[in-house]
Amino acid sequence: MWGNRLNICINTSNLSKLAAQEGGLELLLSKLAEQDLRNIELDEESVRNRDQIHQIFNTVRENGGSVVVLKLRLNLLGGDVKSDEKYFNEVKNWIRFC
């Protein structure tokens, strides 16, 4: 659906608020894609748990988009990344760190 038009840069506290206003994350991403927006910035304050990160990544990937940049402090991943290699390994192929 989105091809390579939509990239996600994880760095603004507004994504959760916008998603709520648009009726959910998938509808928000679809609307942004229709506007040919290439980057969404999301910061760690608006994503508070791993499930939300997985939801964002999966929604984007299921619709043909890609997560190209993840810009956040590593504590978003639940502490030092080295302390959670299993989770990091699940997502590292989707990410290029800033």
Image: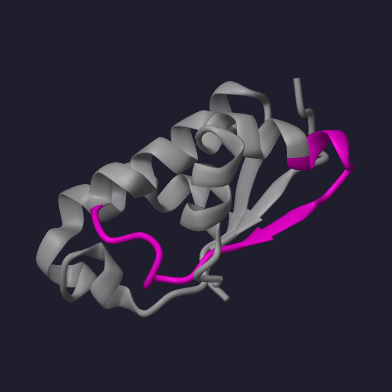
The residue depicted at 35 percent of the width and 40 percent of the height is 54
- Residue sitting farthest toward the bottom: 73
Q: Quadrant of the C terminus?
A: bottom right
Identify the main secondary structure in magenta.
Answer: loop
Q: Give x and y (percent) for residue 68.
A: 63, 54
- Above or below: residue 64 compared with residue 45: above
Q: Give x and y (percent) for residue 63.
A: 64, 23
Q: For the image shown, how many numbered marks are present on the structure?
A: 0
**Residue 48 belongs to magenta span:** yes
- Residue sitting farthest toward the right: 36
Q: Give x and y (percent) for residue 43.
A: 47, 71
Q: Give x and y (percent) for residue 86.
A: 17, 49
Task: Please report the bounds of the magenta region as a residue range.
Answer: 32-49
Q: How is the image coloured?
A: one colour
Q: Quadrant of the N terminus?
A: top right
70 vs 69, left or right, is left
- Above or below: residue 53 compared with residue 96: above
Q: Which image quadrant is residue 64 in?
A: top right
The residue depicted at 46 percent of the width and 46 percent of the height is 93
Front in this rendered view, residue 27 or 78: 27
Q: Which image quadrant is residue 14 in?
A: bottom right
The residue depicted at 28 percent of the width and 69 percent of the height is 76
**Residue 35 belongs to magenta span:** yes
- Residue sitting farthest toward the front: 21
87 vs 9, left or right, is left
76 vs 17, left or right, is left
